[in-house]
Each structure stands twice: as structure tokens, then as C-alpha cells.
């Protein structure tokens, strides 16, 4: 992509990116100030979803969260999943808002040589033989804003769903590992808890990104023929947003200076777990390429 195309792309989508930035910055700021009462909008549905999945009842303890005293398990504000919500929303907005704004149903596609807008698909212009919506088109702006709103709603629903699965794993896996005597000097309950969160959240993020790509690019057959390097390149967006919000922002906030050893250990666990998930993802792409007629 040359400089002219990059500048045109930024002019067309900067408005959406500014809106997305302020929304996500506001969410991050409010989350940093929120207490247990202020997070009941997500803690409550999450606890309810965990009850549906496991049959384990939770009761709300003011100032603490949703607790099961028999299991001595607490769904606290730190377990709310708001950070995953922000990561998911950032990925959906910044990676796909331009595609949503330019999205047209198959019936609205027209020949490149057509210069005027079609009545059934208004608001489009052609520039350098590339079909794009006018950056000032109310229809395009409306589509972009609708996608931002849909991304926030979808991120909330997916966060409750995924976080419920993570909490179920955090309840049952430690007891299983304890029964098989898997805990030791390296694998501790705290590290296992961290690893469960990273694996579940990052795998879900990759899945959400892939499914959203299929929404705009329904050429999954072509994707199966691509190399592992190209598949890995398509993972850069969820990888960037996950690392930026989980490790980058804490690092910029001097988390390393305050607790260097703990932050280094956490960063290493995050990197190893994400690398493992990416390896499995690429292996799956290789297998699909070798057996294109299956799956």
C-alpha cells in the first residue's frame, strides 16, 4: 500500500478511530475506578452463566463479589473480564470498522466502469479503479457507527460467555491437577490460574477475529491454501491488542518498576501460553491445507 492509499485510508476512517479511542479510553478509566457495586452489570450475568453451566450457586457479598462459601470461590471484580471486553472491542472496532463502513451486500456490487451511484446502493464513488464509499457519505458514517455500537454489545455478550468458561475451568482444573499431583516448583495454583485465563481468553480472541473475518471475506476455501506465515500474519491484530492491553499498558504504567519479578514472570507466562495457542492455530491451518476437502 503506497503513501497515497494510506493517506486516503486514514482520511476515510480517522473519524471512526477517534470515536473508538475515546470509548475504549473511557471504559479503561471507568474500570480502573470501579468497585464491586459498579461492576455488577457484568459480575451478575457472569455469575448467573457459571451457575447455568455448573449448577454451583453463587450469592452476592457486598463489597466482595459473588461467592460460593462451600468451594471458597469468589467471583471478584478482578474476575469480571472487563479487560477482555476492552480487548475484544478494540480488536473489532479498529480491525473491522473500515470493512463494515464499506460493506455492501452481493446484490449491490457493480462494475468498476460504472461512474454513478446505483439507486440500490447509494453513497459510493470510484477512485483509481478502486470501489470505495465517499468519506463524507452519511451512509458510510452510519454503517461505521453502527459497527462500533455492535462491537461494544457483542464484546459484552462474548465476555460473559467466555469468562464463564474460564471460571468453570478455574474451579475444576486445580482440583484435578491436585489429584494427579501435578503441582510442583514450576506449576503452582497461582500460575495455573494465570495460564487458564491467558489460554481461554487468547484462544477466544483468535476465534472471534477469524469468525469476524469470515463475515466480511467469505473465501474460506482460499484461506485454506495459504501458508502458515500468512495465517500467522492474520493473527497479528488479536496478538497486538492482547499484548498491548495486558502487558503494554501496565509496563507503561511502571508495573515493572513496582514489581519487577512478578511482572516478568507474568509476561513470560503470557508469552508462552500465547505462543502455544498460535502454534496450534498454525498447525490447524497446515492440516486444513493438506486436507482441503475435509472439515
Image (cartoon, rainbow, N blue to C red):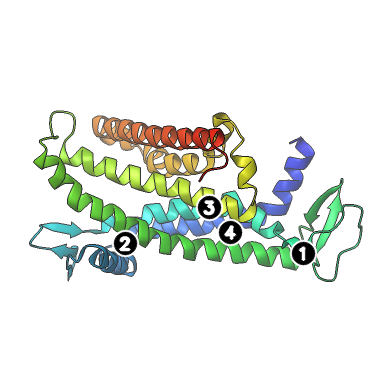
Q: Nearer the viewer, mark 1 or mark 2?
A: 1
Regarding mark 4 in the picture, which secondary structure is present there? Answer: helix
Residue located beneath label 4 in the image:
19
Is the N terminus in the top left, top right, bottom left or bottom right quadrant? top right
Query: Callout 2 environment at 10 Å: few (<14), some (14 to 19), or many (20+)?
Result: few
**91 or 170: nearer the viewer:** 170
- The residue located at (51%, 59%) in the rendering is 23
- The residue located at (92%, 53%) in the rendering is 113
Compared with 220, 152 (above or below) is below
Which numbered disc, 4 or 2, marks the residue that appears first in the sequence?
4
Callouts 1 and 2 close, C-beta under 8 Å: no
Residue 198, percent from left and from top? 33, 43
Compared with 69, 189 (above or below) is above
Residue located beneath label 1 in the image:
107
Q: Residue furthest left?
A: 70
Residue located beneath label 2 in the image:
34
Q: Nearer the viewer, mark 2 or mark 3?
A: 3
Regarding mark 3 in the picture, which secondary structure is present there? Answer: helix
Residue 57, percent from left and from top? 17, 68
Question: Could you say which disc has been placed on residue 211 in the image?
Answer: 3
Callouts 3 and 1 close, C-beta under 8 Å: no
Q: CA distance from mark 1 to mark 2?
A: 47 Å
Regarding mark 2 in the picture, which secondary structure is present there? Answer: loop
Which numbered disc, 3 or 1, marks the residue that appears first in the sequence?
1
**204 or 18: nearer the viewer:** 204
Query: Callout 3 environment at 10 Å: few (<14), some (14 to 19), or many (20+)?
Result: few
Which numbered disc, 2 or 3, marks the residue that appears first in the sequence?
2
Amino acid at each position: 500500500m503506497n503513501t497515497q492509499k494510506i493517506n486516503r485510508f486514514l482520511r476515510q476512517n480517522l473519524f471512526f478511530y477517534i470515536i473508538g479511542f475515546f470509548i475504549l479510553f473511557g471504559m479503561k478509566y471507568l474500570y480502573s475506578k470501579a468497585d464491586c457495586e459498579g461492576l455488577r452489570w457484568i459480575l451478575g450475568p457472569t455469575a448467573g452463566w457459571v451457575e447455568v453451566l455448573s449448577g454451583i450457586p453463587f450469592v452476592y457479598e457486598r463489597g466482595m463479589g459473588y461467592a460460593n462459601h462451600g468451594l471458597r470461590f469468589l467471583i471478584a471484580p478482578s474476575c469480571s473480564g472487563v479487560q477482555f471486553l476492552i480487548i475484544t472491542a478494540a480488536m473489532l472496532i479498529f480491525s473491522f470498522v473500515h470493512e463494515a463502513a464499506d460493506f455492501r451486500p452481493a446484490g449491490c456490487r457493480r462494475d468498476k466502469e460504472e461512474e454513478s451511484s446505483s439507486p440500490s446502493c447509494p453513497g459510493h464513488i470510484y477512485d483509481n479503479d478502486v470501489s470505495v464509499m465517499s468519506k463524507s457519505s452519511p451512509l458510510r458514517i452510519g454503517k461505521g457507527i453502527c459497527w462500533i455500537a455492535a462491537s461494544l454489545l457483542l464484546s459484552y455478550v462474548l465476555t460473559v460467555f467466555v469468562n464463564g468458561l474460564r471460571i468453570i475451568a478455574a474451579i475444576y482444573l486445580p482440583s484435578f491437577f491436585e489429584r494427579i499431583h501435578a503441582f510442583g516448583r514450576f506449576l503452582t495454583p497461582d500460575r495455573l490460574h494465570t495460564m487458564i485465563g491467558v489460554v481461554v481468553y487468547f484462544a477466544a480472541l483468535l476465534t472471534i477475529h477469524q469468525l469476524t473475518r469470515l463475515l466480511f471475506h467469505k473465501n474460506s476455501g482460499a484461506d485454506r491454501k495459504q501458508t502458515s506465515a500468512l495465517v500467522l500474519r492474520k493473527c497479528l491484530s488479536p496478538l497486538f491488542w492482547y499484548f498491548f492491553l495486558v502487558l503494554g499498558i501496565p509496563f507503561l504504567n511502571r508495573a515493572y518498576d513496582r514489581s519487577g519479578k512478578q511482572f516478568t514472570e507474568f509476561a513470560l507466562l503470557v508469552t508462552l501460553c500465547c505462543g502455544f495457542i498460535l502454534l496450534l492455530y498454525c498447525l490447524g491451518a497446515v492440516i486444513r491445507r493438506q486436507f482441503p476437502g475435509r472439515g
